[in-house]
Image: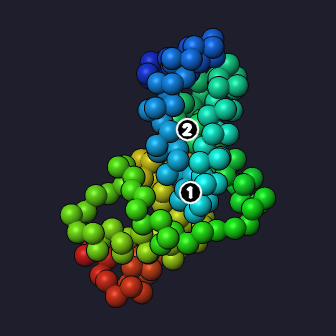
Amino acid sequence: MNKGIAAAPETRLLAKVAQGDHAAFRELYESMSRSVYFYLYRILRDESLAEDVQVEVFTQVWKGAARFRGRSKVKTWVFGIARNLAMNALRKNRHHANIDDYQHIADENQPNPDDADRRWLLQKAMGMVSDKHREVLDLVFFQQMNYQEIAEILAISVNTVKTRVFYAKSALRKAIGKLGVAYDEI
């Protein structure tokens, strides 16, 4: 097990969760639930569905904590579970709400520009890129994951992640341009 990863607070909490420690699970949940929810919401585009899948994610974390081997960060492992469950939910539901209907939802991890118009433009532009591009942009910029972690979550190579990020940024620039705004203005 990687000592740097093993020393992480989340790893110690997960080890306690594996032993049935409810307080450790509560602490792990409180530290990660918000970012997991917003990640799920950006994929599923449905508040209720994101909440349901979030419950499933943390149920699997509770049940599967003993199987965590420490080959990745706990956050990477949890987001991998979240992604798999979100993809399953998308296949089952095939219903996507319009993100514009939920503008009141904000993630403290997202960029917080002073101007509300900038947030709206960025949100609108993100809605204009493909699901694949939106997902990789979310993991890089909102979840602040590195390419290796993203590769593990998406089950693709690091080079594919790099390529996908490159094209996702390009698609985002084009979407911002279609909104009549220069990329530098956001």
Q: Is residue 48 visible?
A: yes
Q: Number of marks in the image?
A: 2
Nearer the observer: mark 2 or 1; the answer is: 1
Mark 1 residue crowding within 10 angstroms, few (<14) / some (14–19) / many (20+): some
Q: Secondary structure at mark 2?
A: helix
- Name which residue lies at 53% across and 59% down: 42
Q: SS class of the residue under badge 1?
A: helix
> Reading the chain from its start, which is encountered first: label 2 or label 1?
1
Badge 1 amino acid: Glu
Q: Is residue 165 above or below residue 109?
A: below
What separation in Å lies between label 2 and label 1 (alpha carbons)? 23 Å
Locate the N terminus by quadrant: top right
Q: Judge whether 1 appears above or below 125 on screen.
A: above
Toward the viewer: 92 or 141? 92
Residue 163 screen position, x and y as percent: 54, 63
Does the rendering let one see residue 141?
A: no
Q: Nearer the viewer, residue 167 or 183?
A: 183
Residue 122 location, x and y as percent?
A: 38, 70
Q: Which residue is mark 1?
A: 47
Say above or below: 44 vs 150.
Answer: below
115 relative to 47 in the view: left or right = left
Q: Position of residue 34 (x, y in %)?
A: 46, 43
Q: Which mark is residue 76?
A: 2
